[in-house]
Image: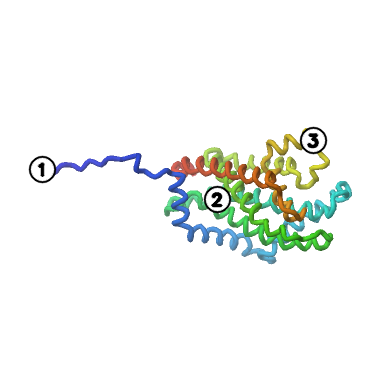
Amino acid sequence: MEKTPIYIYDAAKHPFRPFDEVKQVFKYRFLIVQLLRRDIVTRYKRSILGIAWTMLNPLGTMIVLSIAFSQVFKTTAGYPAYVLSGLLAWNFFSQSSNASMVNLIWGEGLLKRIFLPRTSFALAAVGTGLVNTVLSIIPMLIVMLIYKLPITLSILFLPVPLLVLAMFSLGIGLLVSTFAVYFPDVAEMYQIVLTAWLYLTPIIYPEEILPENVIFLISTFNPMYSIVKLFRIPLYFGRLPVFSEWFVPLMTSFAFLIVGWFVFVFRSNEFSQKL
């Protein structure tokens, strides 16, 4: 009589899930690129202007804000360029983090049919935001030329702020996506949070108009303050950031990325049941 084989599960040999997710992302990198391509094509295929809308959208917002506030903040040199530089960073963050959540919810059918890393949707959303932001830098440079703001070699430092923005957007996107799976109302609430967050970040207004105690509170509890500032320094201010100006946002973004990645990955196995 044959003995029934006994299978022993050795937890010590099971890969650490956050690290295993990184491995799976690399393995399925081609699929993530296809998701990114789908996001870009789907967004612009019915648009007359096509991908040019990526550049015109923040430009149009800048024009509206400039008309409304240019007289109020007329002491700010090249105010439209100041606003646009902040909007580019903010749009990257807000659109990427929101798209991470939306893509995961709409990808329910795909998750149930094939295996793919759950973080793929967030990575594709951040990749799309990165492409859009890089394209949007073109009208930013044109606006700077119009207002006779110097374009210096410090612009070559921009990949660092973009990396910081990408890490922070991915971390927040993963956290919001996790909560949205369990609490559908999070998707609507997040839009309200983004609106309030926008006005609590010196994007439309210069930080110089704020009292010192308010600047202290914003710089301490609002991570987007230092991240937007890091993006502006090489682009709008035309200089390289000092150590504290790039180290603080870099570490902050990395911390949010690690927390978001761990929370999302440890909960991801439950997503197919909740979605």
* Residue under numbered circle 3: 212
- Above/below status of 129 relative to 205: below
Question: At numbered mark 3, what does the secondary structure look like: helix, strand or loop?
Answer: helix
Q: Position of residue 225 (x, y in %)?
A: 71, 43
| Cα–Cα span, label 1 and label 3 | 83 Å
Task: For the N terminus, give its image quadrant.
Answer: top left
Label 3 near label 1: C-beta < 8 Å?
A: no
Tell me, yes or no, if residue 197 can be seen here.
yes
Q: Residue drawn at (83%, 41%), measured in percent from left and top?
A: 209
What is the three-letter code of the residue carrying label 1?
Answer: Met
Q: Which residue is mark 1?
A: 1
The reply to whether the C-beta atoms of the residues labelled 1 and 2 are less than 8 Å apart is: no
203 lies left or right of 254: right
Q: Which mark is residue 122?
A: 2
Rendered location of residue 265, percent (x, y): 48, 43
Q: Classify 10 Å Cα crowding around label 1: few (below 14), some (14-19), many (20 and above).
A: few
Say which label, 1 or 3, has the lower sequence index.
Answer: 1
Q: CA distance from mark 3 to mark 2?
A: 37 Å
* Whole-number angstrom distance, CA of label 1 to CA of label 2: 53 Å
Front residue of 89/178: it is: 89
Residue type (three-letter) at the residue carrying disc 2: Ala
Residue 264's tag is none
Q: Is disc 2 surrounded by few (<14), some (14 to 19) or many (20+) residues within 10 Å?
A: many
Dot 1 or dot 2, earlier in sequence: 1
Q: Secondary structure at mark 1?
A: loop
Q: Secondary structure at mark 2?
A: helix
Q: Is residue 61 visible?
A: no
